[in-house]
Amino acid sequence: MAEIVIRNLRKEFGSFTAVKGSSFTIADGEFFMLLGPSGCGKTTTLRMIAGLELPTSGQILLDGKDVANMRASARDIAFVFQMFALYPHMNVRRNISYPLVSQGVPRAEVRTRVAEIARILGIEAILDRPVGGLSAGDRQRVALGRAIVRRPKAFLMDEPLGALDAEFREHMAEELRALHDRMGATTVYVTHDQLEAMQMGDKIVVMNHGVVEQWGTPQDIYDEPATLFVAEFIGSPPMNFLRFDAAVPEGATSVWLSGVEIPVPLAKEATRGAKAVLGVRPEHVRLDDSAPYRGGVVAAEYLGTTQIVTLDTPNGIVKARIASSESVHVGEPVGLTFNTQTLSLFDAGTGIALAVERPMRRGAQPRENAHG
Amino acid sequence: MNHSVTEPSRLQKWCAGILVVGYALVTIMPLAWIIATGFKSPGDAIAYPPKLIYEPTLEGYVNLFTTRSRATPETLAQLGPPETWYDAIVRQYDMVISGPSRYGERFVNSVIIGFGSTFLSIFLGTLAAYAFSRFKVPLKDDLMFFILSTRMMPPIAVAIPIFLMFRQLGLSDTHLGMILLYTAVNLSLSVWLLKGFIDEIPVEYEEAALIDGYTRFQAFYKVVLPQATTGIASTAIFCLIFAWNEYAFAVLLTSGTAQTAPPFIPTIIGVGKDWPAVAAGATLFLVPVMVFTILLRKHLLRGITFGAVRK
């Protein structure tokens, strides 16, 4: 198993730059998520780690050794493709044993290792079946088996659950995470699904337009998004943005929204321009008739224990996640208050979050909030 | 797979059946006529109105494989009774067998040149198609167009330059010359067809193989090639049929050593209007292509890759 260090990795396809100088570190044994919308460069980054694309510049250190220009076969990593890429002309057993055969592993050992993998994945019964007739889940397991059997330094997975239907996906995600915990193998996982990333990852890198927007634990990223993009991409519904035309000076502890003072965490830096954005997660909005900041209820979506209330405020649409027991009526004006310590401030010009002081960081909000 | 919502009616089925049978009859007719003529006597072969019922004879086949000379009644009497059935057939016409004909040699030439050029076209075509399909080739589109453009004129249009070139290079009437020529003509077809087939094989298979520790060539050989068999088989059939049936260049460039069957068969007619022998030669000439096609038939069935990839 291995630590993977990415340094200033850059990839250009002709005049198009797919990845612009990414840097991050994947610790040994970590389940690492590369998250971003399609075309953000996450798959290109993964393919460069795998050796399927050569970087234009930068370093990929695998256990301290620069492999950026090494052949894929020499890197000792395994790759799980979104479309599985099982060899269609071979049965399940041969598919799984194929990577071992290439390494010249003795036949007896191949048999025992394939049997072991089949037991771990629960696919013993289908070992001699052709891959053609398998269900999506079984094909996914075979693809995993082919990756695991080699005991590689790291696993790279390109949206491996993308081909499964929603119900089964959940199940497979749990299975994958359990498998990872059992083997402790460094895993790099590409996904565009923020829920999947939050649910499974130890660390997440959020990419957009070839740039690493943020890198951290799911909770870091959820609670303290580094940019407007991350704040909007993570969470469902996403973070609310209240835009206002005023600079935030260093040391500010409140901002003025349409003539109402809203307390915020202490700003440790100032905005560059005279426009700023106040970010608030839907679960940190409370409805309070006596509050001075007002909005009108536009819609309410019932979700069982909670409901999502859409409010029209002077600074834009705000969605609030509140208990379904609270009664709201469409068309009614209400007051809004925000959970001060959880608010984020962004520079509207650069889209970058301002550093703020958070005395009671983390653990204050239960993680379930992320799952909408 | 039947996607139609309603089962076709009886009438529709009958009409479709009649159409298919009718079309089959039309296409089989010339073939049946040739095969039938091969078993007729020379007299029956040119009878008018044509005879549909006749006494089959192997005369055509005997004449095809032998050369015969006319003998005087005295010589025939001296020879005694015919030793074999084919001697007997020849004797009816006061002839004796003087030796084997050249049909066998010409047939072997056709096999060598036909299969040789097919093998070469497929071998080179697969490699070129793979490169065009998978790698960044400078001027790829222009090169592909150039390859296709070699097909845009009938090959015979360049017969005279080729004739002169072959004479200069000593390739006239050689197996090598004919194999190279047919390969050159077939390559554009094989590169284009095979590129289409290889394009359809998802690149992830090779990438999986590359990551599993195989070299690029091993990935090509062990993963791509087995999946391209359908394309290779159908392309090979096309290439073989062209090389096998080619007549114009064969007439122009071969006369002896490397002469193929197509230019030879018409020469059998000779002065005797021996249509049954010609028909027999044509019938036997059809066999290898038919066998080849039947052998490769199972590879023409798609679907072995079904389900391994999410489409």
Image (spheres, coloured by chain):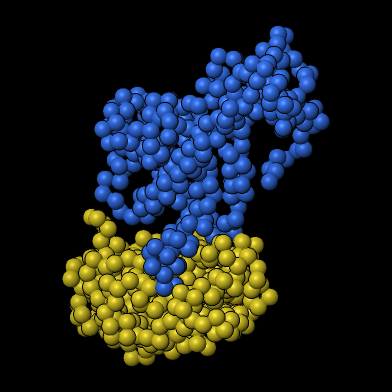
Chain colours: A yellow, B blue
Please say whether residue B270 is visible from this viewpoint: yes
In the rendered image, residue B112, in percent from the top left (x then y), is placed at: 48, 42
Foreground pick, B152 / A12? B152
List the single residue furthest toward the left: A272
| x 29%, y 77%: residue | A67
Is residue B149 shown above or below A266?
above
Quadrant of image for the N terminus of chain A: bottom left
Q: Position of residue A36 (x, y in %)?
A: 38, 67
Residue A58 horizontal side relative to residue B134, left or right: left
Q: Quadrant of residue B79?
A: top right
Residue at the spot 47% in from the left edge and 58% down from the top edge: B224
Picture coordinates of residue A321 (x, y %)? 50, 73
Residue A164 point in image, percent of width and height = 57, 66
In the foreground, B150 or A264: B150
Q: Is residue A100 above or below residue B19?
A: below
Q: Looking at the rendering, which quadrant does residue A256 occupy? A: bottom left
